[in-house]
Image: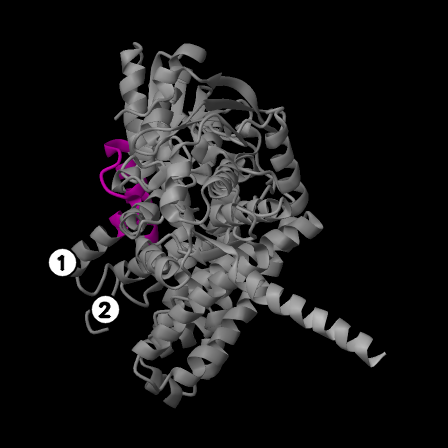
Amino acid sequence: MSRGLLLVLAILISVTAAAGPALAAETIKIGFFAPLTGPAAADGKSVMQAAQLAVDEINARGGAAGKPVELVAYDDRFDPREAVAIANKLIEQDRVVAVVSGSYSGPTRAVAPIFQRAGIPMISAYGVHPDITLAGDYIFQQSFIGPVQGKAGAEVAVKLLNARNIVSLVMDNDFGRSLGKAFREHAESLGATVHEELFPFGEKEFTPILARIRGMNPDLIYTTGYFMEAALTVKQARELGITAQILGTEGADSFQFPEIAGDAAEGVVITTNLNRDDERPIARRFMELYRARFGHEPDMVAASTYDAFIILAMAIDKAGTDPRAIRDAIAETRNFEGVTGLIAGYTEVGEVLKSVQVQQFRDGRYRFLAVIDDIDLITPPQ
Amino acid sequence: MLAQQFVSGIVIGGVYALIAMGLTLVYGVLRILHVAHAAVYATGAYVGLITFQRTDNLWLGLAAAAVFCGLFGVMIHRFVYGPLLDQPRIVPLIASIGLFIFSQDFLRLLFGPYAMSFPASVPFGLLELGDAVIPGRQVFILAVTAVLLALTWYVVGRTRLGLAWTAVSQDAETAVAMGVNVPRVVAFNFLFGSSIAAIAGILVGMHYNSVYPAMGEMPAYKMLAVVVLGGLGSVPGTVVAAFLLGLVETLLVGFAGFVLPRDAIAFVALIAILLLRPEGLFGRSDA
């Protein structure tokens, strides 16, 4: 009896002694930062949810390289200085093997050189600024850069929607300006006339600009605003009796866009990277899981963040936990079926190669309108 | 087009006036820059929206927000500013900023960071004046603003309470000596100013069809510019400055396009006025 008990005890102790420290030490830490508070908190919440969803998925499938993945997440408050402090913490204290940025271009640009110097690979989930990847070969971008999307927008405006007389409303920040510039150049090269108006990030009152535009009788209005600016542009334009087709960007790809725009959302076309009518299992599964767990429609920032984590986990599966090897594995990604479409791979500088989705808001949600996968259009200019 | 720009300038200016009123009233009697007033404004929008969602009655939403925020304002005075009044003026100011940040994050924790829509229908249709189109919502905002500004004018200019407010703002010690019940004046002050700000919050929430935790951010600093422009503590000055600012912003953006961020215009005007007329548009030079 007592011998039997001793034996059981001995086995228990040896098992826990072996497994305990192994479990504690052998997680793979992936760093993450996003604007969870402050003016961009809505996107921060979406990407945080997507990150949790992705990490839970990865762990349910047995983790990466056979070890559980641990998400080390911080709030950068949409502040580049805060992001820099977080970057140093992730590198020195948390000793993460790789990082996903769930933040905007500003904070992501600020930390890219820091991760590059430390030799820690970072995937920017939805930044659009071309300078982010210029920090070096450890930095990747999961969303097409501004110039690609702007060009695609012009293609949609002129070829698909047959616009000739275009007014472009350009938001005065990294995002708006890089899209606006590419849009204008390409639209003009396709023979349309483009009249440009600038507005500041956070603008709510578009009636002064719109009242002036009304006299120009444009057949299309392009807006590079985020969901709030775009929704108010659409709403106020319709109230002033402007009937021109409105074309937006991924900035308007949020379940909050129709919430604020109301009936005016109907018919609006956007360029984005999430196709709501995607029938591929990975996309369906993501959208269903996200809806069920968080109770609202997923948006493109969430989808892009999810893809970033899955690609990272695959790279770790292949390469193990050495940051250098992980970097190489990410760079070697080819034809990956992601939630945001077929990811052909990354360019030399680390920009993603994937098709641009064209969605139209009809009957209460965004629906498939077209897809742009012409390789000349979606390859980032060097 | 001019008419259209003019109308939207007036709508914006009217809302500025409503938000800034509470600040002016508080500054008039306590000489405190009440930054947390912007939090009262955002809270008002939420209370109004939640009540509206539950009851589908906009008037009830307006009333609930006015009452709730009126009391909120009185509490802020009682528990935050009250104990700090004998401290240097920077102390209540810092407390006010702290309260503002706290309230903003509290709203975020309570209601989440996503913007909520305010789908209230108003008892007005589209109004067409010449070539200007005024949506019913804007007509409603103009009407409510006009009523509230008239009410403010009546309360401050025609009632004993308003007289007491003027007396306290001109010289608190003499007012006390003359038998003015200062605590009552101050409490009423917070009640009235905060109620009006709450209604302004609802109007803005309806105007932009969105209520979100950070909506007080812009008013938090821009209203300071309005109050200083108007001559610190001057009620008519605040109203004139608010409408001027609303019109200048709108007309400048409307005719010249994007010269500088709309929110910067307030501060350019502020610097210009302070250089030319340091006491503000309607201030007394000895204030």
Farthest residue, direction right: A1
Tell me the SS state at disc 2: loop
The residue at 63%/51% (across/down) is B59
Residue that lies at the very extreme toward the front in this rendered image:
A3
Q: Looking at the image, tell me whether mark 1 or mark 2 is earlier in sequence order.
A: 1
**Residue A92, position in %: x, y?**
35, 62
What residue do we see at 52% from left, 34% from top?
Answer: A261
The residue that label 2 is drawn on is B284
Residue type (three-letter) at the residue carrying disc 2: Arg
| Rendered position, B116 above or below A343 | below
For the record, the magenta segment spans B242-266
Mark 1 vs mark 2: in front: 1
Establish whether labels 1 and 2 are both on one chain.
yes
CA gap, disc 1 and disc 2: 14 Å
What is the quadrant of the N terminus of chain A in the image? bottom right
Q: Position of residue B112 (x, y in %)?
A: 56, 54
- Residue A117 image position (x, y, % from top left): 26, 50
The subunit letter for the residue under badge 1 reads: B
- Residue count near mark 2 (Cα–Cα under 10 Å), binned few <14, some 14–19, many ≥20: few
Q: Which residue is mark 1?
A: B276
Question: Which residue shows up at 41% across the image and 15% down it?
Answer: A374
Q: Is residue A82 left or right of residue B44?
A: left
